[in-house]
């Protein structure tokens, strides 16, 4: 088999390995698989290519257009998964591992595509929070907006997830409208390179939106500005070296780190042997020790169980580990493959020896284990190694040393408070899990440990069939953690997109804020419609287009009829004396929903037209009671428009109800689906 020559994609050109190239090995055979790296890359040209071509092209697209692009990229990668699987076997990954890395990465793109379409505007400015009124009359307002950074995002990724590690950063970056330069770890860069090639060859990305570095970045970090960002995944030592770069500090370059993590899993005091929770706990720990050969930033490194149940945990977990075939990841029977390289194997053994100074190895002998279908002496194979620490309070290394492989340590706790103390001694982690059927246990751990962990995962017999697992960060939720884990956050839905955008406070009149956000703000100018807005297609409606209707007098007969018809005979509507005793009402008042019904009747156009459906009502507030004899007026304004499908878009209407004195009675936002204009 010929050696792989992994090229970089820099400033629109594929550049072959050159000066400074490094070799990488086949994890299964130990043989050299290929070379990557080139110290002669034109770093300044790469940055200019991203800033001058990729950035403007992405920023010209709306959030929804970028979301559609992400969806198309995910679909394209899905069509080529088998090629990625086939190459990824060389990293030591099994078919099950591919589901986490390759399938998981593609699924993450799909989620960000969906989040972009559902939760972000069909425009160029993201509005953050509510409008703040800063003057008595409401003609001077404030708001927060988010716009894309006008630089480049440099992604430095770890070896363990060559596809997911790239895509979980790339999804929110591209959705934000920022180009990316991706630099994977050399050991598995060949899998990342194929994924990058597939995306570039799809033609879906604007020129300059994505570049790829196989090997080192040279002095790229020394050329970044306040408009750039660095997102890093790897060791704490490397993160410290990078974030301490004087240039990054001087320029206040955004730096997000996801690094070492001594994640813990706690067996609840109620989860005794024989319960579904005990069995679930053993299953979760086994999975986290063996999936990706334990090379996961979220893997369980510390197993925390009630002291009385420690022997049962060791026995059950050892029995399950003994039934885990180790070997060639291509073999169907294999359940745990190799580590990524023999260098990584040596590192794990060194760290395991450090842990072994404070804990006894109770399962797994690295000098005597069986490897199926491969040469265990040449490949980067190790058995799962389980340690037991009898005194976690005196121990130090088990709380600060991470063996990044199939290594975990069992320790006992006296009570739940003690368990929380042990979990927190990791100094900050990406995730801690609690297996319990007692909600009180979950609450105590959440209050005691939440500040030390980026994610708390609770599971029991009710959720175990649907849960995603201790070690699976989901794109909907933040991934990251305090302290040792790096102090950063990734993913988290739209929160992850914000890492690549600038939040800016804006101040001005309602007209100014409406123009900037392309969303009508109360107090801004109203647009007189040439015809009833319900007769006009989505494309014809203008932001601020307003319909006024009324007045309509509310009578006592209206109130009584509504009460009889709906069954809502609450005393405030039917009993004058009782209503008068209520400090909120002057006497009998009209039903709030009667007012909404009358309002709809006042602004609706009954004939068939472009309005297809009423799909929601947001932010309803009743401000002043309405009594018999009051008159009702309605103002209906086009607040925002969002394209949803090829057939219709969503119109958000601002609705205000006032009485005969011009006082606000109620306010809300109405959502309708409107057909596009013919």
Image: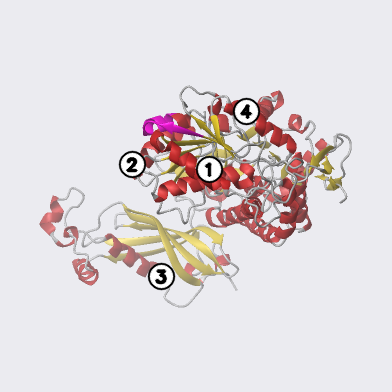
Closer to the N terminus: mark 2 or mark 1?
A: 1
User: SS at mark 3?
Assistant: loop
Q: Which residue is mark 2?
A: 440
Could you tell me which residue is drawn at 13 percent across and 58 percent down? 576
Residue 319 in the image, given as x and y percentages of width and height: 52, 46
Q: Nearer the viewer, residue 277 or 207?
A: 277
Residue 209 — which label? none
Residue 488 in the figure: left or right of residue 215? left
Residue 604 — which label? 3
Residue 237 in the figure: left or right of residue 274? right
Q: Is residue 537 above or below residue 105?
A: below
Could you tell me which residue is drawn at 61 percent across and 26 percent down? 354
Asked if marks 4 and 1 touch (Cβ < 8 Å), the reply is no
Asked if marks 1 and 3 touch (Cβ < 8 Å), the reply is no
Closer to the N terminus: mark 2 or mark 3?
A: 2
Asked if marks 4 and 2 touch (Cβ < 8 Å), the reply is no
Real-space Cα distance between discs 1 and 3? 69 Å
| Segment colored magenta | 410-421
Colour scheme shown: secondary structure
Q: Nearer the viewer, mark 2 or mark 3?
A: 2
Real-space Cα distance between discs 3 and 4? 76 Å
Real-space Cα distance between discs 2 and 1? 30 Å
Real-space Cα distance between discs 4 and 1? 20 Å
Question: Which class describes the residues within 10 Å of circle 3: few (<14), some (14-19), or many (20+)?
Answer: some
Q: Quadrant of residue 237?
A: top right
Residue 305 in the image, given as x and y percentages of width and height: 43, 37
Residue 485 part of the magenta-drawn span? no
Q: Is residue 492 visible?
A: no
Q: Nearer the viewer, mark 3 or mark 4?
A: 4
Residue 318 — which label? 1
Real-space Cα distance between discs 2 and 3? 51 Å
Q: Residue furthest left?
A: 577
């Amino acid at each position: 088999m010929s050696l792989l020559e992994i090229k970089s994609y820099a400033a629109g050109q594929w550049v072959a390995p050159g000066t400074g190239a490094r070799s990488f090995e086949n994890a299964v055979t130990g043989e050299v698989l290929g070379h990557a790296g080139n110290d002669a890359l034109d770093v300044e040209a790469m940055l200019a290519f991203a800033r001058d071509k990729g950035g403007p092209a992405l920023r010209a697209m709306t959030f929804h257009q970028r979301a559609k692009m992400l969806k198309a990229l995910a679909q394209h990668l899905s069509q080529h998964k088998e090629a990625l699987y086939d190459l990824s076997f060389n990293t030591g990954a099994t078919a099950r591992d591919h589901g986490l890395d390759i399938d998981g990465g593609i699924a993450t793109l799909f989620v960000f595509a969906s989040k972009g379409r559902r939760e972000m505007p069909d425009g160029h400015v993201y509005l953050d929070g509510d409008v703040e009124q800063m003057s008595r009359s409401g003609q001077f307002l404030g708001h927060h907006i988010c716009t894309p950074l006008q630089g480049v995002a440099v992604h430095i990724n770890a070896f363990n997830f060559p596809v997911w590690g790239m895509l979980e950063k790339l999804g929110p970056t591209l959705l934000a409208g920022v180009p990316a330069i991706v630099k994977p770890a050399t050991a598995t860069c060949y899998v990342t390179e194929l994924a990058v090639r597939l995306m570039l060859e799809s033609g879906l990305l604007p020129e300059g939106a994505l570049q790829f570095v196989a090997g080192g970045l040279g002095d790229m970090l020394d050329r970044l500005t306040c408009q750039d960002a660095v997102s890093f995944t790897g060791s704490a030592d490397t993160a410290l070296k990078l974030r301490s770069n004087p240039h990054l500090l001087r320029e206040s370059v955004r730096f997000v780190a996801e690094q070492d993590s001594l994640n813990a899993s706690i067996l609840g005091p109620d989860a005794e042997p024989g319960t579904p929770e005990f069995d679930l706990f053993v299953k979760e720990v086994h999975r986290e020790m063996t999936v990706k050969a334990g090379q996961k930033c979220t893997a369980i490194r510390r197993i925390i169980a009630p002291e009385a149940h420690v022997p049962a945990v060791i026995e059950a977990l050892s029995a399950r580990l003994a039934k885990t075939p180790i070997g060639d990841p291509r073999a169907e029977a294999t359940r745990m493959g190799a580590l990524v390289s023999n260098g990584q194997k040596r590192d794990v053994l060194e760290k395991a020896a450090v842990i072994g100074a404070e804990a006894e190895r109770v399962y797994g002998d690295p000098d005597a284990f069986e490897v199926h279908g491969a040469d265990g002496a040449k490949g980067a194979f190790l058995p799962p190694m389980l340690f037991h620490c009898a005194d976690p309070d005196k121990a130090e290394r088990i709380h600060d040393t991470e063996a990044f492989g199939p290594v975990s340590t069992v320790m006992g706790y006296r009570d739940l408070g003690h368990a929380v103390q042990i979990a927190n001694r990791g100094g900050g982690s990406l995730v801690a899990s609690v297996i319990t059927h007692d909600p009180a246990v979950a609450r105590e751990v959440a209050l005691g440990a939440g500040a030390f962990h980026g994610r708390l995962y609770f599971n029991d017999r009710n959720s175990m069939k649907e849960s995603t697992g201790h070690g699976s960060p989901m794109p909907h939720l933040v991934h990251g953690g305090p302290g040792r884990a790096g102090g950063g956050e990734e993913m988290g839905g739209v929160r992850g997109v914000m890492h690549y955008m600038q939040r800016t406070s804006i101040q001005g009149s309602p007209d100014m804020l409406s123009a900037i956000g392309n969303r009508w703000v109360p107090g801004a100018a109203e647009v007189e419609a040439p015809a009833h807005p319900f007769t006009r297609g989505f494309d014809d409606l203008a932001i601020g287009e307003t319909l006024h209707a009324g007045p309509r007098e509310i009578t006592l007969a209206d109130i009584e009829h509504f009460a009889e018809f709906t069954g809502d005979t609450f005393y405030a509507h039917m009993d004058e004396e009782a209503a008068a005793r209520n400090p909120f009402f002057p006497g009998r008042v009209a039903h709030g929903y009667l007012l909404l019904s009358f309002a709809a009747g006042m602004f609706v156009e009954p004939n068939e037209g472009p309005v297809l459906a009423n799909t929601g009502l947001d932010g309803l507030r009743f401000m002043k009671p309405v009594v018999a004899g009051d008159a009702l007026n309605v103002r209906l304004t086009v607040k925002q428009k969002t394209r949803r499908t090829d057939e219709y878009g969503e119109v958000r209407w601002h609705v205000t109800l006032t009485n005969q004195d011009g006082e606000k009675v109620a306010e809300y936002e109405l959502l309708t689906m409107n057909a596009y204009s013919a």
